[in-house]
Amino acid sequence: MEQLHGECVADPYRWLEDTDAAEVQAWVTAQNAYSAHHLDGLPLRDAFARRLEAIWDTPRRSLPQIAASGARVFEANSGLQEQPVLYWQASAKAEARALLDPNAMATDPPVSVGEYALSPDGGLLAYTLSQSGSDWRTLRIRRTDTGEDLPTRIERVKFSSLAWTADSRGIFYARYPEAPANADPLFDPLAHQRLRLHRLNEDGADSAGDHLIREAPEHPRRGFSAQTSEDGQWLWIAAWEGTRHNLLFAQPVDATGRATADAIPLVTRLQHDYAVVGHHQETVFVLTDDGAARGRIVAIDLNAPQRRHWRTLVPESTEVLRDARMVGGRLVVHALRDAASVLRVVSLQGETVHSIPLAGLGTVTGLSGRQNQAALHYGFSTTTVPTRSYRVDLSQTPLAPALVHAPPPRFDAASVVTTRAFATSRDGTRIPVLLTHRRDLDLDRTHPTILYGYGGFNIALTPRFSTRAAAWVDAGGIWAVANLRGGGEYGTPWHEAGIRDNKPQTFDDVIAAAGWLIHNGYTRSEQLALHGASNGGMVVGAVVNRRPDLFAAAVPAVGVMDMLRFHRFSIGWAWKPDYGDPEKAEDFAVLRSYSPYHNIAPNTDYPATLITTADHDDRVSPAHSYKYAARLQWAQSGEAPILLRVERKAGHGAGKGTQQRIAEARDVLAFTAQFTGLAPTVSPVRNTSPTNPD
């Protein structure tokens, strides 16, 4: 027990926070063995594995990243390759050749490519490598003509952008300092990030010492990202201290990246979000929620950057602005209308000159192009069609998007239907629910259903293809996605309605969506499973604590489960803008009221629960899931199992290999099927967990 803000709080499984300790490792091994004993025998496990692999086994490629020279790089996966391969082209019509293949790097632990940036002349690729899915990166630079790496090797890179100088000999990046010799045990490895410039000599060798571009010693939690203007004359610097809000500076630079004048402060208060989306002569275009809850794009004169001089180019509307990019001298604006994408082209005077037709209710997955070229590349996906790549010439009228790449179908889209409905939350708010199921499903009876949600960090869940969802629907289940408050589907008010002291409204929304599915005859509690990841994993835990009777199964993945200590693990402190600060009494009271780990009730009949995490997750520490699993196993009074599945040599999700992804999806779907009735009936599995009360 410990006293927190005058309350005695029990934390019997705190010993599991020391994730590298031998006793914790032994406990994890026992948990995995216990889980494997149950998962290996699930009736539909092999069938789901085959179906997932069949759907996954299709060629995929990303949008191109295009250099000033016309050279470009893109990622491609032939189907079941563990990691995508990076390809290089000298021009749009040139033959593509493999430049960087992480699958050929025979390393243990496994590596994956993180960020990458092609130099303006197309001759060099800066890229980062991650081990076991960690957020920590190593920065390397590779020649595109020979495929050879330069000697450059920069460690301690994390949460960094990559941006080249105009002369293609310098790269801007951000890193954290090394721990000093005999460092204090309280040394913070995620403090004092610095933005730096790494220069290369003409022979490709590293020049002496990197140049410090920006730091904030008085703000140890402040981090930086940077992007260069396409003409190479400006460096746009964003400064952040959490997941919300940033400062913005415009730094004049020469072709080598050296400052030619003092930086111009564009935004000096951490009150809103600002993203540079284009630049023309002395004007920079910025997407922001400053003065516009659903977003607007403003034009800022770099000679008169004060806010009172800002000019609104794209005003706020009923749509939510999510992204924009300057292509061919115009702004391509991506917005959401009822959580589905719309795409239009806006002149630099603010006039909408085109609407780009999209192939149904879906999601624009990315935009690519250059300011002085008319070719726009974009990706688009729906719930039944994987991401396809399109190219459209913005100088033509009417616009005629051309299909560039479409994965061969491994899923019969015509046999599936997606509909949108609205549930009513406890306070009367309408909650969108997107339902996907087979067209021939008999809706006169109920069916096993997975309800998926996120509801946090201004992230929008929009209609897009999911291999996991496709396999579930193909097997006869219903896949439902709820747009919860806290997400970004309807702008800042929707986001703020599900953060800090409003966070419980997110849980109300889940319960309302589940109730709507039941009331309208789609499913029953005995057939309903709740699934979510990261923040969504926390939502699953909090909702199941409130209504364990509402679900037959629950799958919280890489969840934030200890809301009283989340700020003590890795980058958790950056989540305070959404969650609040446990060190403050007023925030503590709210967090204590729903923290999944702390609100587990002993002797309760909880639904069958599969908790998934990874041992190298340094975004959301696996300790969250370890502690939650141990306490839930101790509290379970019913027959349903509480399982913990810990992926080895993997992180929060990025960089996870294809076979790891398929195996996890296989186990999640087979487990869910077993306890929602999609699988053949078998004898109930008793809860005989290896965890004893501490």
Image: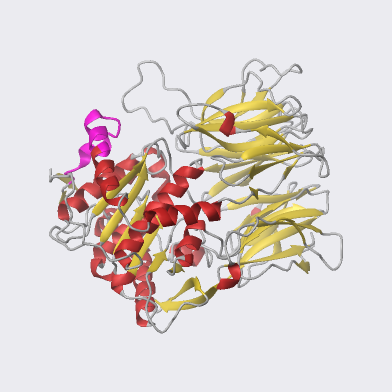
What is the residue that sits farthest to the right in this orientation?
396
For the residue pair 306 and 526, the one nearer the viewer reads as 526
Q: Residue at x 32, y 46 (%)?
A: 645
Q: Left or right? Give the position of 586 relative to 669.
A: left
- Does the stretch in magenta take in 25? yes
Q: Left or right? Give the position of 6 relative to 460.
A: left
Where residue 498 sits: x, y (%)? 41, 63
Where residue 528 sits: x, y (%)? 34, 69
Magenta part of the chain: 11-29
Task: Check the image and report above or below for 193 versus 564.
Answer: above
Where residue 233 sits: x, y (%)? 76, 37
- The total number of labels drawn is 0
Which quarter shows the C terminus?
A: top left
Q: Residue at x 54, y 74 (%)?
A: 417
For the residue pair 432 and 234, the one nearer the viewer reads as 432
Which quarter shows the N terminus?
A: top left
Q: Left or right? Give the position of 176 relative to 40.
A: right
Instruction: Kindly tell me whether residue 536 is visible in this rendering.
Output: no
What is the residue that sits farthest to the bottom in this orientation?
444
